[in-house]
Amino acid sequence: MSHQLATNLARVEKLIKKAAHDTRPPTLVAVSKMQSVDTIKAAYDAGVRVFGENRVQEAAEKFTDFKNEYSDLTLHLIGPLQTNKAKAAVAIFDVIETLDRVEIIDAVAAEMKKQNKNPTCFLQVNTGDESQKAGCSIADMGALLAHARAIGVTITGLMCIPPLRDPPALHFALLKKLGRQYGLENLSMGMSGDFERAIKLGATHIRLGTIIFGVRSKP
Ligand SMILES: *Cc1c(COP(=O)(O)O)cnc(C)c1O
């Protein structure tokens, strides 16, 4: 397992370097959802320092002790956040990529003050305007960014998950344009199937699960 993991990682790192040959290499966020703590530790031993989880509860269970033990580890929330999980999310995550509405920005802001913590925050944008998908609409971005700023939440980037129906490059290019328009430097875009395109289109963070850990089995 850990041998396979190291092999996968080495291969991915080579592909990232190649795709980023004329840009700054992005941060690799290793998406460890549904992976065991043992697998996560193997990834750490292979050099991974940045992990992504999409569920607050699962992340707290797997990472609370691990993070206390290894202080050089960074954890990203990449899944939708509910207000009743804001407290736990602020406690465990260093980067929250999925702010997308006023209520959740308010809940996170309140917890940041209470816990005296300052996670890095991104706005998730529903670039494909899909009704079932999290993320704010493009039309709401300006108001949400202004609201966040007004209550002391600094948003430094954008995140998107392209719809399956479209070529992902369309959405990566759009997210980059929006980042430029709003003066946000971080762009979280690109997964196992499309990260090279995302890098070429300016991703600063790529979120890779399957290509590192293999196909996720259901719990
Ligand atoms: C699971 C997940 C990923 C990783 O997907 P892979 O195709 O396994 O690389 C990336 N981003 C989000 C938001 C996810 O939920």
Image (spheres, helix red, strand yellow):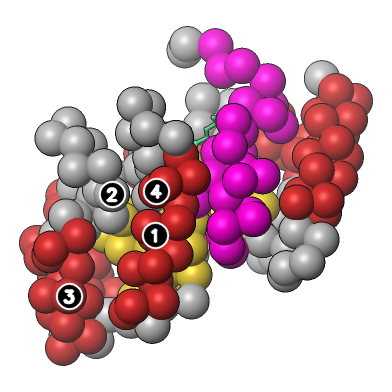
Compare residues 102 and 125 and report the one nearer the observer. 125
42 vs 20: above or below: above
Residue 128, by quadrant, is top left
- In percent of width and height, residue 115 lies at 32, 74
Three-letter code, disc 3: Gly
- In percent of width and height, residue 199 lies at 63, 54
185 vs 59: above or below: below
**Which residue in the protein does label 3 denote?**
142
User: Between disc 4 and disc 2, whose residue precedes?
Assistant: 2
Dot 3 surroundings within 10 Å: few (below 14), some, or many (20 or more)? Answer: few
Look at the numbered disc 4 and give the secondary structure of its residue: helix
Is residue 206 shown to the viewer in this render?
no
- Mark 4–mark 1 contact, CB under 8 Å? yes
1 vs 152: above or below: above
Look at the numbered disc 1 and give the secondary structure of its residue: helix
Q: Residue at x 19, y 43 (%)?
A: 129
Question: Magenta segment range?
Answer: 189-217
Q: What label sits on residue 127 in the rendered view?
A: 2
Is residue 13 in the magenta section? no
**Which residue in the protein does label 4 denote?**
171
Q: Nearer the viewer, mark 3 or mark 4?
A: 4
- Mark 2–mark 1 contact, CB under 8 Å? yes
**Which residue in the protein does label 1 denote?**
175
